[in-house]
Image (cartoon, coloured by chain):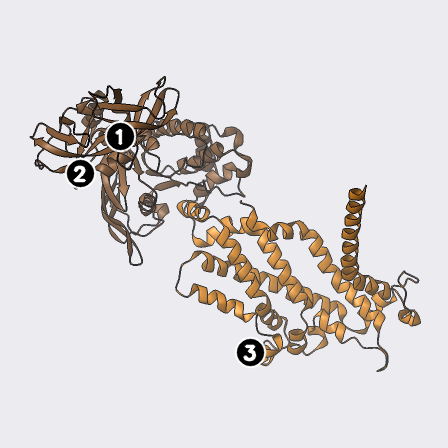
């Protein structure tokens, strides 16, 4: 009897812990959704269950500023960053994992060390670089600066993954007459899907949520990405904080991420455990 | 169809040389096996021929052309890897057609060649499967099929059977031998298993530490090993070596005194040897018999008896560090702890000089051996 009780207690404790974690992770988003449907003074009443329902915030967020344009910018930049990161990441990791050359280890460490600098530290230098390239206030400027955030982990994860691929697989392709590019494209890429989805998604999230570079390297409203646009949403007067609009905008920009994660959920899991399973 | 000729081929990895000037002549249509202990350089030598490693020095000719600097696909060689190395995301058909596709053969041609290979290897039912849905033996056959469709001049096998279980290995061994007979293409096969080498090869190349110890037919290596290393490597269980001292020597025979004080005259060419030289006598386990203690060459205490069914292996402590192994009848009554005498026919004994070189045996009489040697 005692043993049974203890077993139940242990189960209860486990689920209690899960509940706390879920609450901690989900509650802020839940509260944002709740607030986004409220208007007027209801915004400032604390309530945990839906009391009123109105889509007015979702409509007005598109009216006050070029929010549709901002969303497009975010999507464009994020996809560009993912595409460039994966292209450079895969080709670089092939060289770093498969081609023997002097200074390979040093190069890997250098790439990793890029991610050690805080964004603020490189901000002014990056600004000069972007302006020098004539990419100030442009989506391409943002995409290039985001590569600094995404490439180090992309290259590292893909290099580690590629190193684990059997060498004989590549050699078999070479015997079949494949050039390095064909080896990458037709043999490694299909095998590396899980790792690419994982790193690609992480790169997408990083680019989607980035704020500091986006704020600094853009000037006009129509070039801004969503995080900056949300931060700059202003009310009718100086003393009014348009919480409804901000919450509606936040919900809108979070949804794509949730959808992406749900779509690729299985791939991500298999990507994270990929090293353990042989192809 | 091509012969493969190596002239003073060397391979260096940085400052370390792993292949020390190998000369080799593999004839068209021959089944040649590289055999040796792990780390002897046999796989490296194969990879040099394949073009997966660069040759540091020397000359490699396939069908008369120097191919040192030719990329693998233009050498006309196909390779089967130890891990099979099938493309996991492609079906069996796509795996086999991949090389043809890269070589820009037409779809019809690809189809015809893959179907022909699938028929040879009994893979027709499996063409749509992915490698992970196949058993080990089937994967092996797909890997061989991938090599066949390219119609190479030379097949290279890198320990292809070592991942299979014992029963399947015997079966694949026979299938490979049949395949060789059917295709009649030059095949080079790497293994550490001397049984595979003995059963499949036309020509065996025994390697040790990056040098060729001996090249010959299976029976040549068995009956005329060039030195103690080859003598010990070919044959299972391995040959017994016992120290001896020469008491009488001529071109027709050598008389040695064993540690047991027993003297025996062996039909071996003794030129180069002198009385009182220290030599080693080699006796294969299968040539031993148990004898009375007074007529035996030497005696010892039985430590272990292994019953294999068709034969028994008796491990005998004779005073030296290594146990002496004798292969006896399967129904032997010998027990652990007994003292037994060992006898062997004089013509079955080998004599190695102080430099471990074998002295020529003069009384070998073996019909298949003569047939093999006549072929060469």
**Against B220, is B214 above or below?**
below
Q: Residues within 10 Å of mark 2 (few under 14, many from 20)?
A: some
Which residue matches tag 3?
Answer: A129
Residue at the spot 21% in from the left edge and 28% down from the top edge: B223
Alpha carbon of mark 1 to alpha carbon of mark 3: how far? 71 Å
Q: Earlier in the sequence, mark 2 or mark 1?
A: 1
Q: Position of residue A223 (x, y in %)?
A: 68, 73
Counting labels gives: 3
- Secondary structure of the residue carrying numbered label 3: helix
Residue wearing tag 2: B357
**Secondary structure at numbered mark 1:** helix
Image quarter hosting the N terminus of chain A: top right
Left or right of B76? Residue A169 is: right
Q: Residues within 10 Å of mark 3 (few under 14, many from 20)?
A: some
Looking at the rendered structure, whether the residues under marks 2 and 1 are on a common chain is answered as: yes
Q: Residue at x 46, y 28 (%)?
A: B119
Q: Is residue B26 visible?
A: no
According to the colouring, which chain is brown? B
Residue B370 lies in what quarter of the image? top left
Report which residue position mark 1 lands on.
B218
* Circle 2 chain: B
Chain letter, disc 3 residue: A
Residue B78: x and y in percent read: 37, 40
Q: Nearer the viewer, residue A217 or B208?
A: B208
Which chain is orange in the picture? A
Q: Gap between marks 2 and 1, in whole Å?
A: 19 Å
Q: Is residue A43 visible in this depiction of the protein?
A: yes
Mark nearest the camera among 2 and 3 is 2
């Amino acid at each position: 009897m005692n043993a049974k009780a203890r077993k139940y207690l242990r189960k209860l404790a486990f689920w209690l812990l899960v509940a706390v974690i879920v609450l901690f992770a989900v509650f802020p988003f839940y509260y944002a959704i709740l607030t986004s449907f409220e208007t007027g003074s209801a915004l400032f009443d604390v309530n945990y269950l839906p009391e009123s329902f109105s889509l007015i915030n979702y409509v007005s967020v598109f009216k006050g500023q070029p929010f549709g344009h901002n969303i497009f910018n975010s999507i464009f930049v994020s996809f560009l960053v993912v595409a460039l990161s994966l292209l450079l990441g895969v080709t670089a990791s092939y060289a770093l994992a498969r081609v023997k050359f002097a200074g390979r280890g040093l190069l890997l460490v250098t790439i990793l060390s890029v991610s050690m600098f805080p964004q603020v530290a490189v901000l002014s230098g990056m600004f000069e670089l972007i302006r020098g390239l004539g990419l100030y206030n442009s989506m391409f400027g943002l995409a290039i600066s985001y590569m600094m955030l995404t490439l180090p982990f992309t290259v590292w994860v893909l290099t580690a993954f590629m190193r684990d691929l059997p060498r004989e697989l590549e050699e078999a392709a070479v015997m079949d007459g494949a050039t390095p590019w064909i080896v990458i494209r037709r043999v490694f890429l299909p095998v590396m899907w899980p790792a690419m989805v994982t790193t690609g998604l992480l790169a997408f999230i990083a680019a989607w949520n980035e704020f500091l570079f986006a704020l600094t390297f853009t000037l006009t409203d129509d070039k801004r990405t969503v995080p900056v646009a949300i931060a700059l949403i202003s009310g009718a007067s100086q003393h009014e904080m348009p919480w409804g609009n901000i919450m509606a905008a936040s919900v809108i920009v979070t949804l794509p991420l949730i959808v992406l994660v749900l779509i690729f959920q299985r791939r991500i899991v298999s990507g994270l455990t990929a090293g353990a399973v042989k192809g | 169809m091509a012969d493969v000729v190596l002239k003073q081929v060397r391979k260096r990895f940085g400052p370390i040389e792993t292949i020390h000037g190998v000369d080799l002549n593999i004839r068209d249509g021959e089944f040649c096996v590289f055999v040796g202990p792990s780390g002897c350089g046999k796989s490296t030598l194969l990879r040099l021929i394949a073009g997966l490693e660069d040759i540091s020095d020397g000359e490699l000719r396939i069908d008369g052309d120097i191919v040192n600097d030719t990329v693998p696909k233009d050498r006309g060689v196909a390779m089967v890897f130890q891990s099979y190395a099938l493309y996991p995301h492609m079906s069996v058909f796509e795996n086999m057609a991949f090389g043809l596709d890269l070589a820009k053969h037409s779809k019809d041609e690809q189809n015809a060649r893959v179907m022909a290979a699938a028929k040879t290897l009994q893979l027709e039912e499996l063409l749509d499967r992915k490698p992970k849905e196949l058993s080990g033996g089937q994967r092996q056959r797909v890997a061989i099929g991938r090599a066949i469709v390219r119609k190479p001049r030379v097949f290279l096998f890198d320990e292809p059977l070592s991942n299979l279980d014992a029963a399947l290995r015997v079966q694949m061994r026979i299938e490979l031998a049949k395949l060789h007979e059917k295709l009649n293409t030059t095949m080079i096969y790497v293994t550490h298993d001397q049984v595979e080498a003995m059963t499949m090869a036309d020509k065996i190349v025994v390697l040790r530490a990056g040098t060729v110890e001996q090249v010959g037919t299976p029976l040549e290596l068995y009956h005329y090993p060039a030195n103690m290393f080859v003598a010990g490597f070919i044959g299972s269980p391995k040959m017994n070596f016992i120290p001896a001292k020469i008491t009488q020597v001529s071109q027709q025979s050598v008389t040695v005194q064993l540690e047991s004080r027993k003297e025996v005259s062996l039909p071996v060419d003794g030129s180069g040897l002198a009385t009182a030289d220290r030599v080693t006598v080699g006796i294969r386990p299968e040539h031993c018999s148990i004898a009375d203690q007074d007529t035996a060459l030497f005696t010892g205490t039985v430590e272990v008896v292994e019953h294999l069914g068709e034969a028994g292996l008796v491990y005998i402590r004779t005073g030296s560090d290594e146990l002496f192994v004798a292969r006896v009848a399967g129904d032997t009554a010998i027990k652990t702890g007994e003292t037994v005498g060992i006898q062997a026919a004089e013509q079955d004994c080998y004599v190695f000089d102080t430099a471990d070189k074998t002295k020529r045996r003069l009384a070998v009489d073996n019909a298949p051996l003569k047939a093999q040697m006549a072929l060469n």
